[in-house]
Structure formats: structure tokens, C-alpha cells
Image (spheres, rainbow, N blue to C red):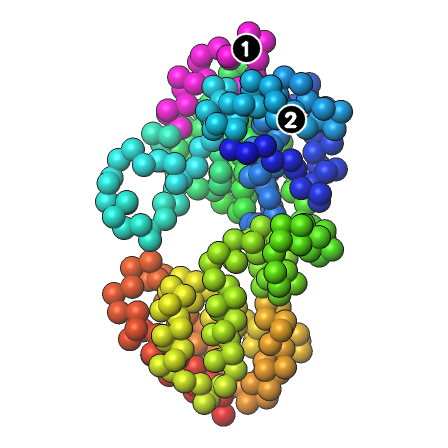
Amino acid sequence: MIVKKYYLWQSSTWQRLMSDKKRLPHALLLRGQSGIGKLDFAISFAQALLCEQVNSAHQACGACPSCGWFEQDNHPDFRLISPEQDVSKDDEVSTKSTKKRTQIVIEQIRGLSDFLSLSSHKSDGLRIVTIHPAEGLNAAAANALLKMLEEPPPNVIFILVAHQAHKILPTIMSRCQTIDMPVPTTEDALLWMKQEGIQSAEILLSYSGGAPLMAVDEVEEGVLASFEICKLLSFGAKSDIFQLSTACLVLGMENAINALQKWSYDLLLFHFTQKVRYYQNQEGAVKKLVQQLNLSQLLDFQKMLGDAKKSANHPLNSELQLERLFLHYTQIFK
Ligand SMILES: [Zn+2]
């Protein structure tokens, strides 16, 4: 775990929490949309709270023993609970590597009790548990966590991170102090992306709906390849079904369906508002297609995409499914 500072757009949240760090509640809930740096904030915050010599901006020093443990990912007073981490059982998962675990299970929460009953590494010290994403707690795990929050052990802070806070048990919510995590302005997001050396930052940022970290992930997920697919889609009724299917198979079903959903969203949005959201560099093509649009066929297409998404993790016959989809796509346009 590398020392990460908070992001530019999080500085007032950081200062506000840190200026009152002696009186932090025993549970915080950081909520906000995906891809704006909530988990990084939570981890940096934990590191700074545990750091032995924070600087004047309340940031971790990166040099003390505590920061050293963080970097090696084995701080004795810190635990990160997330779905991916539970690989203890069910070896099947590794063979089906496309299937991502999405739930936090009760064993993971029960596994905390030893950690919570021990005293901290330091005599006066703090222990921190970060749970990400909190909506990933399944029912049994959520109830187990609730019991811990009802009788919080001394000197323990729980930091829950949520993209979809409405899915969290209200009884858990009520025991946390909720922090609404800021979404960066376009300027701040672009500045950061450019510092990270991201090419085509503007295009990627609008594609990710303004979430810069998601935009950066998308570079890896081949989003730029999805722009190639959109070029093929811009032929409307004359799109080449086989070329499209091949391009989608190369990109991978999940990413391909995602790209298609955003494309059809832009068609629909442009139809009603003369604006696009995701594919700003394709606005001209979208405008042209919308003039030939059959709305109910587009809505059917979106429904088909929704169904395809559900099976995207275990595609038995992706090729056939894609060809059906694109055949329908060509019929959207008069
Ligand atoms: Zn330190």
C-alpha cells in the first residue's frame, strides 16, 4: 500500500475531519459516486490517524514505523474488509476468474473479533477497520457488523465506504456519521488526470460521467477500443454486424455491453435534449442517427442490452448474442 495523499478535491473534507480528530465518532460512512477516490481517502485517512508524526497538513509522514507497515500492507492496527479479499474457501472462484465476488460475508466480519478484542499495538492506540463497499455486506454480515457498532470497542474507528448508501441497513447508517464525499469539478478532475499522464483525458472523463478514477481504470479496460466500436455503430442501419461482433468479443462482453449501453443512452438523450453525455467526440454522428431514429426500437434495444448484461459474466454464446443485438440495432434506424 503506497502512501497516498487525499485528492485535491477532498482537501476541505480532510481538513474538517482532521481538525477534530480527537473527537471522531466510532463509525464514519463515506458515501458518494464510484470513481471519485473514496477508498483512497479512507485508507489515507487511516494511515494519517495511525501515523506517529503527521505533518502540519495532517498528512501521514511516510517514514515512521506505522507508515512502513502501511506500505507493506500489514499494519497490525488496520484492517481492510472487501469482497475480493475473501478467498479462503471455494477454489472454484479462481478458475472462473471472470466472476468477481461482490459480497462481504459473515466470516469476514466474525474474523474481526480477535482484532477488536486485542489491545492496539501501541498502548494508547487506535485500531481502524475499513469496509469497502459497505453495500457489499450481505444480510448476515451486516447484522454481525451492527452488533459491533452497537457496542463499539474502545479506540476503534470503523470507516465504511459506500457507492450506494441506500442499500445499507438503516440501523447501520444511524450508527455512523455520514460524510458526503465531494465530486471533483471538471477542471480539478482534468488537472489530476493530466498529472497522471492520461491521454485523451477530456473524452475519458465525460465517458466516465465525471469520475476521474473510473476514467483512469477505463484506460485499462480498453475504453478507447470502445470508441472504435462507436465508429462502427455510427453507420446506423448500415452497420457491419460481423465486424461489430468481432470488435466486441475482443473488448470482452462486459465492457462491450457497457459501451453499447452508453451509446444507446446518448442516442436517447440526444433525441430528447440535443445533448450527449458519454461520447462527446461522436456528437455529430449521434445527431445524424437520431434523425432516423425509431424510438420504440431503441427502447427494445436497451432492454436487450440489459438482459445481455445479466449474462455477461457467463456468456455461453456471446457471438450469437452479439449478432442478434446488432441485427436489432440496424433496425432502430429508418
Ligand atoms: Zn508516519
Q: Secondary structure at mark 1?
A: loop
| Place of residue 63 in the rendered image (x, y in percent of width and height, measured from the top left) | 61, 22
115 left or right of 90 in image? right
Confirm whether residue 155 shows in the render. yes
Does the stretch in magenta take in 66? no
Whichever of callouts 2 and 1 sits on the residue coming sooner in the sequence is 2
Within 10 Å of disc 2 (Cα), the crowding (few <14, some 14-19, many 20+) is many
| Place of residue 158 in the rendered image (x, y in percent of width and height, measured from the top left) | 54, 27
Which amino acid type is shown beneath numbered disc 2? Ala
Q: Does the Cβ of the disc 2 residue fall within 8 Å of ligand 1?
A: yes
308 left or right of 72 in image? left
Does the stretch in magenta take in 117? yes
Q: Secondary structure at mark 2?
A: loop
| Place of residue 208 in the rendered image (x, y in percent of width and height, measured from the top left) | 58, 59
Q: Nearer the viewer, residue 52 or 284?
A: 52
Which amino acid type is shown beneath numbered disc 1? Lys
| Place of residue 33 in the rendered image (x, y in percent of width and height, measured from the top left) | 58, 50
CA distance for labels 2 and 1: 17 Å
The residue located at (26%, 69%) in the rendering is 317
Q: Which mark is residue 122?
A: 1
Say if 193 sits above or below 248 in the image.
above
Count the numbered circles shown. 2
Say if 8 sits above or below 201 in the image.
above
Q: Which mark is residue 190?
A: none
Say if 75 sits above or below 227 in the image.
above
Name the residue tied to disc 2: 60
Residue 280: name its quadrant: bottom right
User: What stretch of residues is rendered in magenta?
Assistant: 109-129
Within 10 Å of disc 1 (Cα), the crowding (few <14, some 14-19, many 20+) is few
The residue located at (48%, 10%) in the rendering is 119
The residue located at (38%, 36%) in the rendering is 85
